[in-house]
Image (cartoon, grey):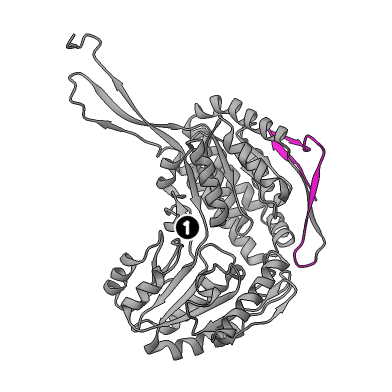
Amino acid sequence: MNISLLINGADRAASGGRTYDRLDPFTEKLASRAAAASLEDVAAAVDAASAAFAAWSKTGPGQRRTILMKAADIMDAKAGEFTRLMIEETGATAPWAGFNVMLAANILREAGAMTTQISGEIIPSDKPGTLAMGVRQAAGVCLAIAPWNAPVILATRAIAMPIACGNTVILKASEQCPGTHRLIATALTEAGLPAGVINVLTNAPEDAPEIVAALIAHPAVKRVNFTGSTKVGRIIAETCGKYLKPALLELGGKAPLVILDDADIDGAVNAAIFGAFMHQGQICMSTERIIVDEAIADEFVAKLAARASQLPAGDPRGHVVLGSLISLDAAKKMEGLIADATAKGAKLVAGGKRSGTVVEATLLDRVTPEMRVYAEESFGPVKPIIRVSGEEEAIRIANDTEYGLSSAVFSRDVQRAMAVAARIESGICHINGPTLHDEAQMPFGGVKGSGYGRFGGKAAIAEFTDLRWITVEDSAQHYPF
């Protein structure tokens, strides 16, 4: 499949005619051949977005809402095409792809609903005869940089609210899934989004640093949002800081699932299985640390290991729970984590085997801080179980990480769980539920090394607009001199 750039409403080859190939990680066959954008294409995309901003920012909320709602229906109708692309480009399973399309379409609908919620306020003024207002206005051209792991959800999230707020957008697609990301823009353009409001750049992997640096540096780009690794997020943040440009960053995670001694053990097992192994653990909210009170640990681990051992893994086109990891390197990293932990005393209680890019659901019990898997984001199906003695140690271990995106607490005593949740350093915490959960209207983001800013619902309006103070005053007012 050949993937073109989208600039000013038109499909375009890269200015130099270059392309790059994305291979299916499971079959190693060609998944897509995409245009490899140059700096000339960067300039053209920014120019197109800049030119479209004047009209789009003045478009009424009803028209913006209509287009976004129609795009959601078109996206739903393209579920089969999205699913095929996600399987071929990323090794995802069909159920994960279907969920991506469903939630992404809802993100478009939620953004459409927000067009009439971009409100301001009247602020009392001490100056007689003055009407003072706080007014939100579209910021301008927004750069959206989206990852491969939940490609339809995260790329749609990166562009939907900026568009709803009256901004124009450049989506820098992931090198791992150019076709999947490009198809999102097709749904929007088919819905009637004017030329230049959404532009898509695909680039060869080796060109990414240069392309991103040029996009952030361009004076017309007013906002940046990035979802991806903390390592790259730091570079994005530093570059944005250099140019004094606001950035919304949703980065890595090492989500703790804290299971207190009075927890519903079967409920906690269900949440752990889902949170740890959905999409092979390649989700920023994935359960990355299972922290369980030693009073119930033996029973919990036995039940969890039994369930994990039954999860089928293999060809993502088959009836499996765990499909392919994104690359062979990612799969080999899992072997490294397992070898390191077992050499230092961890007990392998489920899984542990790799076949190509497929790794079984793997659990390592009695993990300690000396082991890589304790602190390092695995971003795969290898999960540590850490036994603790009491609530205070559980909270300490939960916070013993550079990350702070999602978390969860299990206890039959909701007041106790609420008190623990309040002390966990994370942007998200679920009580008696999995670490893995997302809805379009929720404020989504993290703290610490997981980034800053919030996607979702009303919280995102503040990220993609400028709040201006505007007054209407008495021209005959008195001045002191």
Report the amino acid beneath label 1.
Ser
Judging by the rendered image, the residue that carries numbered circle 1 is: 450
Q: Residues within 10 Å of mark 1 (few under 14, many from 20)?
A: many
On screen, residue 305 above or below 157 = below
Depth check: 126 or 8 in front? 126
On screen, residue 365 above or below 253 = below
Depth check: 318 or 301 in front? 301
Q: Residue at x 61, y 85 (%)?
A: 309
Residue 387: percent from the left, percent from the top? 43, 83
Depth check: 449 or 362 in front? 449
Residue 472: percent from the left, percent from the top? 29, 19
**Quarter of the figure that contains the C terminus:** top left
Q: Circle 1 — which element?
A: helix
Q: Judge whether residue 76 is colored magenta.
A: no
Q: Is residue 446 left or right of residue 187?
A: left
Query: Looking at the image, can residue 8 be seen?
Result: no
Residue 163: percent from the left, percent from the top? 53, 38
Q: Is residue 460 left or right of residue 189?
A: left
Please provide the residue range marked out in magenta. Answer: 1-27
Query: Looking at the image, can residue 53 be seen?
Result: yes
